[in-house]
Structures are given as C-alpha cells and as structure tokens.
Amino acid sequence: MRRPLICVLLLVFLLAFPSIGFAKWDQVAVNVPIPPKIKVDPGEKVLVTLARSTDHWRLDVGRELSRWIRRELGRSSSLKLLDVPPPPIPEQRAEALAVNDLFWRRLGEDYQADIVVAAIVNFNVEDRSGYMETDSIHPITGQTYRSTQYVERTGFKMRVHIFFFKGDNGALLHNDIWTEERILDNRYAEDLNVLFELLEGMRKKLLGVVVPLVVAEPRYIWVD
C-alpha cells in the first residue's frame, strides 16, 4: 500500500511544480581572462636568439623556431621585435642557461634589448608503423567490416624549453616547457608542414607569456 501512495504523492508534486521534472545540470562555456605570465610595457624591445636544436637531416629547426617566435610576438603583441640576425646561445644545459645572467645581460646591452628570448628545441621523427584494426566498407554488400592491416605511419614530437630574460640585468623572468606530438599516415607526413602544425599548437602558450588571453572553460549550471 505504501508504494502506490508514494507514486501518487510524487505525481501530485510534479504536477504542482512541472519544471522540477525537467531540471538538470547543463554545461556552458565561460570566457575566463588569463593575465600574462610577465608584465611588459608597449614598445619594449625584444631580442630573439637562435634556438638551440637537435640535428635534423633536412630542416634547421632552431632557426625555424626563432623565426616563428619573432613573427608571432610581432603580430600579436605591442612589443618591438628587433630585426637582427639571431645570435647563438651557449652550449649549456637548461639549468645553467637559466642562471647565466652575465651572458643575457651582455646580450641585452649589446643589442639594447629590454627582453631576451631563448629556447632549446627537440624535434623527433620516428617510425610508428604497425598492424592496426581498421574499418572498411565491403564493395559489394556495402557492409562495414573490421580487419587488421599494416599501416605505415610516422610519429612527430616537439619539445620546446623557452626562456624570457630581463635585458638590463639578465634575470630570468619566465621559463616553461611545451610539448606537442602527432602520428600521421606517411602520405601526409611532410616534416616541414608538421613542424609548423606543432608550432601552431604552441601559439597560445607563447602569446600567454606577454599578452592577456581569454580562454573558454566549461562550467555547469542548474537549469529548469
């Protein structure tokens, strides 16, 4: 007897408050402002050094990275990028570069730079071919079937350790490590194109060091 009574009371409640029965948590995108990692003033002069890189059989990865940093900061910030050949940096471990304030201060003085940017980049290409399960459509029946096939693929991975130094005293302002990777069918695995695709994945991280960003983040709200 109690179960029918509970069902009747629940029905009466839903009829009295019909919106309750359809209420739920809903996901919405909220724009969240993100302040820059370091404070810069408009017109400050920036020297981008020649990024140190691992050897690649065809690409000068370090030079491509330095060009990309200059281009993106010049397009999307109020900083003044010095139009000079990028000077090389010492062959030191990242930990030693971060505290080599004498070297960075000398670069700042020589080029009259307010900020000096340096980077160490690793761009690795490796064979990722192997047997994979793939879905195919039968040419006669039109049905989808699964089979195991040998697929030739190439893996690309980029790791960038970036540094921002104060030009007048060589102090470290900011440093971070960014990584991006892709695994592509060999038909589309062209090294230079993939290099820029990986850099594009790091673009917001680069700009977020010196300019404020707005990031869309998911939030949950209760709706009737």
Image (cartoon, rainbow, N blue to C red):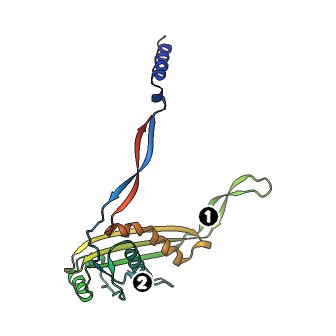
Q: Mark 1 sits on what residue? A: 131
Quarter of the C terminus within the rendering: top left
> In the rendered view, does 120 fall on the left or right side of 106?
right
Q: Is residue 107 above or below residue 190?
A: below
Query: Residue 23's x, y, as percent?
Result: 46, 33
Q: Residue at x 48, y 29 (%)?
A: 21
Question: Which residue in the rendered view is the most extreme toward the right?
Answer: 140
Q: Is residue 18 above or below residue 198?
A: above
Query: Residue 84's x, y, as percent?
Result: 35, 88
Label 1 is placed on what type of residue?
A: Tyr
Q: Mark 2 sits on what residue? A: 63
Q: Residue at x 61, y 70 (%)?
A: 152
Secondary structure, mark 2, is: helix
> In the rendered view, does 220 fall on the left or right side of 187?
left
- Mark 1 or mark 2, which is nearer to you? 2
Question: Which residue in the rendered view is the most extreme toward the left?
Answer: 169
Q: Is residue 6 above or below residue 45?
A: above
> In the rendered view, does 123 fall on the left or right side of 39?
right
Snapshot quadrant of residue 102: bottom left
Question: Which residue in the rendered view is the most extreme toward the top?
Answer: 1
Residue 4 or residue 15, whichever sits in front:
15
Residue 34 or residue 163, whichever sits in front:
34
